[in-house]
Image (cartoon, rainbow, N blue to C red):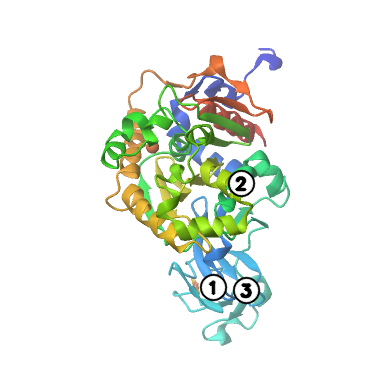
Amino acid sequence: MDASVQSTKWERLIEPGRVHGSLYADSDIFQEELEKIWYRTWVYVGHTSEIPNPKDYVTKSIGPMPILMVRDRKGEVRLLMNRCPHRGNAVCVIEKGNRATFTCPYHSWTFANDGRLMGYAYPDGYETADKSKLGLGTVPRVSIYKGFVFASMAEDGPTLEEHLGGAARAIDQLCENSPEGEVEITAGFLHHRSQANWKFIVENECDGYHPAFVHASIFAVADSGIGNLYGPDSTAVTRDFGNGHTEVDLRPEFRLRDEPLSWFGTTAERLPDYVAKMNAAHRPDKARTVMIDGTPHIMIFPNLFIAEIQLFVIQPIAADETIQHVTALQFKGAPDFNRRMRQQTMGSVGPAGFLLADDTEMYERNQRGLATREPEWLYLERGVHRERRDENGYLVGHSTDEVPSRGIWRHYKKMMEEE
Ligand code: FES
Ligand SMILES: [Fe+2]
């Protein structure tokens, strides 16, 4: 066969309007994804507000790999591998705290919070060892955008700003909703494990086709107008920012309503302190626009989902296993607003919450469905005939169209084809 017409493995599995089911189930593909996506591109790790003081730390991850996010004595944010150079044990298993050193529980080697090995138990056994070569591993590149800490395991590559591209606008939009311009991740995390491939979850985050059906019960109980945002008459749009980043932009619907805080299911009268602080922080017309537009609904590839009032961190564990770490967003200087965000978060994604439970049931059923052999492909063409470019050149479609899924797969294929 002529080499020029030979298709790559990825061309055979990913077509513009459909993807092969094995992409969600094959463990060799999962291992390859770790190398080509999770240990290469920028991955969201945590937020600077989780470690406000010197010596604070939190346990985090890059893909399945456990790491520590630490603020060292000088106030610098560092990412260390949570793996003891002696026998591989985790040097820290407690989720967060404040410590100058980490002592491995197995044989008690002790490390400074910049990763240096400080000492061994019974050091007379190590007269010939070189301590300087036995520190904790470090993450090659760390970059912070408005407090959001990202890591890349590749020594070189695009900068974080290049990777985020137009998706940075959503982080800006989020921060503007705080009267002090800053988000705080201080509400604590829930950890939801599901038996589903990480890509089903990434795709679901900006799938505007399912909410009216899957979430009908919570919309009815909460007497919420959210369902209409995803109905056939919605003016909201789905958008593909490139680099795998996608959003459902609900601002057109909120602008039609023209009511500050309607996006949050409330009114300005119910949150007078917050509104007063927003008016003081911005020009009044700007404050009004920010409070009408609300916060974004964006999936920053591959693992950060900002869902209006919550933040989800997606952690792949195996081809058919993923953990979602979920927390309520909090705005600096907005205690009245924050209390409501925590309450709503408990109702939607807490232990007895409806929203995540309903979604999880769907992606777990998708995963189980892959065991049924026919048809082998998954169909992604919804709205392909009405895709268009917005004023910034990004592809957009109706809120129920599969513009995001197609964008995710285009980027995925590009990353997987790179050597
Ligand atoms: S495994 Fe950590 S000190 Fe032995
Ligand atoms: Fe959902």
Up/down of 2 relative to 57, above or below: above
Which mark is drawn over residue 285? 2
How crowded pointer 3 is (Cα within 10 Å; few <14, some 14-19, many 20+) is rated as many
Q: Amino acid at mark 3?
A: Asp
Of the image marks 1 and 2, the number of the one nearer the N terminus: 1
Instruction: Report the residue at 56% width, 70% height from top.
Output: 52
On the image, which quarter does residue 389 sit in?
Answer: top right
Q: Position of 139 compared to 186: left or right?
A: right
Q: Is residue 183 visible?
A: no
Looking at this view, is 247 or 26 the one in front?
Answer: 247
- Where residue 286 appears, as percent x and y from the top left, is 62, 47
Q: CA distance from mark 1 to mark 2?
A: 39 Å
Q: Amino acid at mark 1?
A: Asp
Q: Is residue 376 visible?
A: yes
Under circle 3, the secondary element is loop
Q: Position of 203 compared to 362: left or right?
A: right
Looking at this view, is 87 or 177 the one in front?
Answer: 177
Which mark is drawn over residue 72? 3
Of the image marks 3 and 2, the number of the one nearer the N terminus: 3
Is label 1 or label 2 in front? 2
Q: Are marks 3 and 2 in contact (CB under 8 Å)?
A: no
- Where residue 285 appears, as percent x and y from the top left, is 61, 46
Q: Amino acid at mark 2?
A: Asp
Please identify the quadrant where the C terminus is shown: top right
Instruction: Report the residue at 31% width, 50% height from top.
Output: 347
Q: CA distance from mark 3 to mark 2?
A: 42 Å
How crowded pointer 2 is (Cα within 10 Å; few <14, some 14-19, many 20+) is rated as few
- Where residue 400 appears, as percent x and y from the top left, is 45, 25
Under circle 1, the secondary element is strand
Looking at this view, is 348 or 9 the one in front?
Answer: 348
Up/down of 43 relative to 72, above or below: above
